[in-house]
Image (spheres, rainbow, N blue to C red):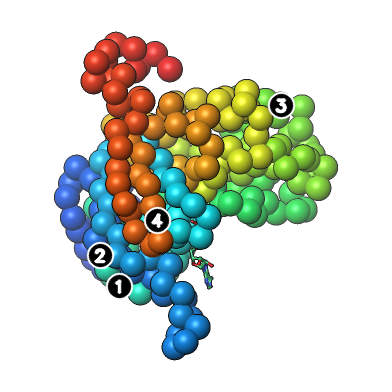
Amino acid sequence: MTALDPARTAATPEAALAGDRDLAVRVRGVTKEFGTGDSVTRALRGVDLDVPYGELLMLVGPSGCGKTTLVSIIAGTLEPTAGEVAVLGFDLVAMSNGRKVRFRRDNVGFVYQAYNLLPALTAAENAAVPLLIAGWRRAAAVEAASDVLDTLGLGDKLASLPSELSGGQQQRVAIARALVHEPRLLVCDEPTSALDAENGRITMELIQRIAVQPDRAVIVVTHDSRVYAFADRIASMEDGRIESIAVGPRQMRTSSDSAASGSL
Ligand SMILES: Nc1ncnc2c1ncn2[C@@H]1O[C@H](COP(=O)(O)OP(=O)(O)O)[C@@H](O)[C@H]1O
Ligand SMILES: [Mg+2]
């Protein structure tokens, strides 16, 4: 798919290659402060994190510990106060804003905690937005988006407006929108919070099938212990820091029985 052609990304000198080639995400010493003086909030207090290609990393921790702040910085929608952030080998801190917009468009899918659907567009049109921005013809984009929505159980809601959908249905449209252009980095902020067990599982299976590939990586923020089974590693955050990283069930299964890991 031309939207994902890495050569387009590599051509720009300002986006210097940074970090380790085996890492989809490399975060070093990242801090984030909101506000100033007495009212300053230290949302991140020095985060180091590596996400290798091919991995699905889950990020867990209590409300307010900095999960959304961290994944927003990794996805390039928020600037760190200090520290280094390399994504797919590119130095996000050194990137100009215009360059970052294009980098995100071509390489990053983001499922926001608030779904951020466009109210005047149908479900299929909302899910097609990344393809339309990448220059696809409208009919082809809507057809591709409709296929993803169908997989997520929304085949009968393609023409519905967001206001006509339940919270869980809107959440699945937002997930379809983040996956439709097969981004190399997929970041999901609590993607299954409004879903029942069955739809949570279908969603995680789709995320795993599309996004967990040798040249891609996925970060999923979650409170939902039902989906931990899909994690390669689980990073626990507390008070602006990553306190520990545990090997997830999927990784344990992969190392003990590599044949089973490919069958999902
Ligand atoms: N735009 C903002 N302005 C001021 N404070 C913020 C902003 N965004 C987040 N915070 C604060 O930063 C801390 C971390 O928030 P957040 O990253 O949203 O946590 P989580 O996603 O883990 O619930 C919280 O104390 C929150 O109130
Ligand atoms: Mg959050």
| Closer to viewer: mark 1 or mark 4 | 4
Quarter of the image where the N terminus is located: top left
Tell me the amino acid under the disc marked 1.
Ala
* Image spot of residue 233 (x, y percent): 33, 36
Tell me the amino acid under the disc marked 3.
Gly
Residue identified by numbered label 2:
29
* Image spot of residue 32 (x, y percent): 39, 70
Q: Is residue 169 above or below residue 48?
A: above
| Closer to viewer: mark 3 or mark 1 | 1
- Marks 4 and 2, how far apart at CA: 15 Å
* Image spot of residue 146 (x, y percent): 65, 31
| Closer to viewer: mark 4 or mark 2 | 4
Quarter of the image where the C terminus is located: top left
- Marks 1 and 2, how far apart at CA: 7 Å
Tell me the amino acid under the disc marked 2.
Gly
- Marks 3 and 1, how far apart at CA: 45 Å
Residue identified by numbered label 1:
82
Specify which label sits upstream in the sequence, 3 or 4: 3
Tell me the amino acid under the disc marked 4.
Glu
- Marks 2 and 3, how far apart at CA: 44 Å
Q: Are marks 1 and 2 in contact (CB under 8 Å)?
A: yes
- Marks 3 and 4, how far apart at CA: 40 Å
Q: Are marks 3 and 1 in contact (CB under 8 Å)?
A: no
- Direction left: furthest residue: 20
| Closer to viewer: mark 3 or mark 4 | 4
* Image spot of residue 51 (x, y percent): 28, 44
Query: In this rendering, does residue 12 appear at all?
Result: no
Q: Secondary structure at mark 2?
A: strand
**Label ID, residue 155:** 3
